Amino acid sequence: MEVLRTENLRKIYQTPSGEVRALDGVSISIEEGEFVAIIGSSGSGKTTLLNMLGGLDDPTEGDVIVRGKRLGGMKGEELTVFRRRNIGFVFQNYNLMPILSVKENITLPLKLDGMGIDKAFLNRIIDSLGLREKLSDLPEMLSGGQQQRVAIARALSTKPAVILADEPTGNLDSVTGTEVVGLLRSSAAAFNQTIVVVTHNEEIAQIADRMIRIEDGKVR
């Protein structure tokens, strides 16, 4: 079943030197449970595409459809709530709240949305990511790899339509980075979770079910 689709996405910037097409007619489709890597060099448009998929930026033309809902028709609070409930994010810099414990960071999206906590599901996530002994720790007490595990757990906690990971291994050494991507891969399988990873790393992309290559704002 299709969970995410883009229709002829374009993002055009006007600069003093002329028009820049960061995205130029991108149409892709991603199925439920897929682990997809979007790969491209710096400046290719892959991060711009990720921002569009997550509703963090508006396209100049085209639309993004998540679980049958068009993001282009939503604004303000409606978009914020939809994004919080349907899209999980894993960033290069982890983006954990420094004053909250590991457990509090994981459950933060649920509490912000006033959602009840599925304790059995939450325990599965915590155990699958090896965080049981770290639940009371603050982020500063964790290694980079452990912090990224917390970020993955937080993204999984709301059972989103899709998790978007932007260069999730960028601040990690190669061994830890490979481990983190492996955890994303196993999470996709264990929880039937759709995951889209943006990366410039070919080795990481090879782990995915499918690669989407983007260059000069176009899918190649």
Image (spheres, grey):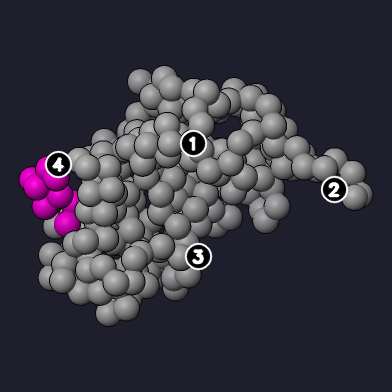
Q: Are marks 2 and 3 in contact (CB under 8 Å)?
A: no
Q: Is residue 125 magenta?
A: yes
Q: Quadrant of residue 28?
A: top right
Q: Nearer the viewer, mark 2 or mark 3?
A: 2
- Circle count: 4
The three-letter amino acid code for the residue at tag 1 is: Gly
- Secondary structure category for the residue under label 3: loop
Residue toward you, 71 or 146: 71
Q: CA distance from mark 2 to mark 4?
A: 47 Å
Q: For mark 4, what is the residue?
A: 116
Q: Nearer the viewer, mark 1 or mark 2?
A: 1
Residue toward you, 21 or 173: 21
Q: For mark 3, what is the residue?
A: 170
Closer to the chain start, of discs 1 and 4, is 1
Q: CA distance from mark 1 to mark 2?
A: 27 Å
Magenta segment: 117-126
Figure check: 1 above or below 199: above
Residue 192 visible in the displayed image: yes
Name, please, the residue furthest toward the right: 17
- Secondary structure category for the residue under label 1: helix
Q: Nearer the viewer, mark 4 or mark 3?
A: 4
Q: Residues within 10 Å of mark 1 (few under 14, many from 20)?
A: few
Q: CA distance from mark 2 to mark 3?
A: 29 Å
Q: For mark 2, what is the residue?
A: 15
Closer to the chain start, of discs 2 and 3, is 2
Q: Nearer the viewer, mark 1 or mark 4?
A: 1
Q: Are marks 4 and 3 in contact (CB under 8 Å)?
A: no
Q: Is residue 136 left or right of residue 75?
A: left
Closer to the chain start, of discs 3 and 1, is 1
- Residue sitting at x 63%, y 25%: 62
Q: Position of residue 211 (x, y in %)?
A: 52, 40
Which mark is drawn over residue 76? Answer: 1
